[in-house]
Image (cartoon, rainbow, N blue to C red):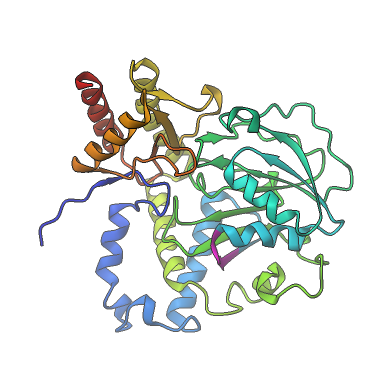
């Protein structure tokens, strides 16, 4: 069968490494002589338990996750984590949040259902196009935790320097920058990431949680599936997990190790993002929308000189094999998500297209 794969710039679900997809295809009908696909096998089988254990071990190695942190594979996506975090961690009924975009906004809305939310800093005044100065924070002492979205996909901003948590537990939504660069896990009490952006197929989140935060949850009546302790006690198999996502993520973890680990991924991501940002900085038609020092390496947001021109770019780009360049429906514009799996040549080809579009405009 003849086909042409496109350069997929979607913010998620996003492209996966072709080498991983090829390996998955090779095991689709018969995983390691089991006579079945991973999608068909029991989550209690010896074959799948080995898959899950190996995936966790490889992730721990990639990130340097200490033994006193649990690694959980939980269904429900990021939206469920907006609720699970306050339900499990807001024991005093108060938490501090940083408002830097739509995803932190949604997290704030859910946390308010569980208790008091202190807005510690916000960039709403400029349409969430920058990360606010957090050098002089006024953090109430009884805050149970501080919460930030470390990379906001819609506006293309990222935290390059973490706020001083002043001894409080720091919680990070790392969904759109997970495994794109080294992470010192001990800076956080909890890290979570939806896997569909930079790791695997949609339908699962990875939660990395310090063990001392498990006990003594907010409400003993909390639904069992929303209790981190239930997942930790059963090693992410309280119920049938998203077996396929765990399997695919495990393949990606092994691929990243072969590529050189997270330091190498950061180098590559900086290199390919520079190609696009350098073009935008010198372009007379296009311009980036995020403040320069807060630009995301994963989600490059930009615009032409009009909404009509943006629409033309999306249409013509798709015809030439560059898909999903349309900005988020809430703000419009253009967006190129260039996660780990996007090769540098894909970004270079996009820049060649944009340069030619500008020339003919």
Q: Is residue 8 left or right of residue 53?
A: left
Asked whether 304 or 261 is in front, the reply is 304
x, y percent for residue 262: 48, 43
62 above or below 140? below
- Seen from this angle, which residue lies furthest left? 2
Q: Is residue 324 left or right of residue 78?
A: left
x, y percent for residue 45: 46, 84
145 above or below 39? above
- Seen from this angle, which residue lies furthest front? 308
Q: Residue 293 falls in which quadrant of the image? A: top right
Q: Is residue 279 left or right of residue 12?
A: left
Q: Residue 38 falls in which quadrant of the image? A: bottom left
Q: Main secondary structure of the magenta part?
A: strand
Q: Is residue 144 magenta?
A: no
114 above or below 319? below
Q: Which residues are magenta?
A: 72-77
Instruction: Identify which residue is drawn at 59% across, 40% down.
Output: 101
Instruction: Identify which residue is drawn at 72% across, 34% down.
Output: 121
Residue 67 visible in the snapshot: no
x, y percent for residue 23: 28, 63
Asked whether 315 or 2 is in front, the reply is 315
Instruction: Identify which residue is drawn at 69% across, 67% down.
Output: 228
Circle count: 0
Q: Quadrant of the C terminus?
A: top left
Instruction: Identify which residue is drawn at 49% across, 58% down.
Output: 58
Q: Quadrant of the N terminus?
A: bottom left
Q: Is residue 75 magenta?
A: yes
67 above or below 186? below
x, y percent for residue 292: 51, 22
Residue 202 visible in the snapshot: yes
């Amino acid at each position: 069968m003849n086909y042409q794969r496109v350069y997929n710039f979607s913010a998620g679900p996003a492209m996966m490494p072709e080498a991983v997809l090829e390996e998955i295809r090779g095991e689709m009908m018969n995983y390691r002589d089991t006579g079945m696909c991973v999608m068909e096998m029991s989550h209690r089988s010896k074959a799948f338990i080995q898959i899950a254990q190996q995936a966790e071990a490889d992730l721990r190695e990639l990130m340097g996750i200490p033994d006193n942190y649990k690694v959980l594979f939980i269904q429900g996506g990021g939206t469920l984590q907006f609720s699970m975090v306050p339900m499990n961690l807001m024991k005093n009924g108060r938490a501090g949040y940083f408002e830097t975009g739509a995803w932190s906004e949604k997290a704030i809305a859910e946390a308010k259902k569980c208790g008091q939310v202190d807005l510690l800093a916000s960039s709403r005044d400029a349409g969430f196009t920058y990360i606010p100065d957090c050098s002089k924070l006024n953090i109430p002492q009884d805050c149970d935790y501080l919460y930030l979205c470390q990379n906001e996909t819609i506006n293309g901003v990222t935290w390059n320097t973490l706020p001083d948590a002043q001894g409080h537990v720091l919680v990070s939504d790392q969904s759109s920058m997970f495994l794109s660069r080294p992470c010192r896990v001990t800076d956080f009490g909890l890290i979570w990431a939806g896997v569909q952006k930079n790791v695997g197929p949609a339908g699962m989140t990875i939660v990395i949680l310090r063990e001392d935060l498990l006990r003594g949850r907010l409400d003993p009546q909390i639904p069992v599936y929303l209790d981190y302790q239930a997942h930790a006690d059963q090693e992410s198999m309280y119920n049938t997990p998203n077996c396929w996502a765990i399997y695919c993520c495990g393949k990606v973890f092994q691929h990243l190790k072969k590529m050189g680990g997270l330091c190498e991924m950061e180098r590559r991501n900086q290199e390919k993002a520079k190609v696009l940002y350098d073009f935008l900085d010198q372009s007379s038609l296009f311009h980036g929308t995020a403040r320069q020092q807060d630009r995301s390496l994963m989600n490059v947001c930009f615009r032409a000189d009009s909404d009509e021109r943006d629409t033309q770019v999306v249409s013509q780009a798709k015809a030439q094999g560059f898909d999903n360049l349309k900005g988020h429906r809430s703000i419009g514009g253009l967006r190129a998500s260039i996660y780990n799996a996007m090769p540098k040549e894909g970004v270079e080809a996009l820049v060649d297209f944009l340069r030619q579009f500008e020339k003919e405009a």
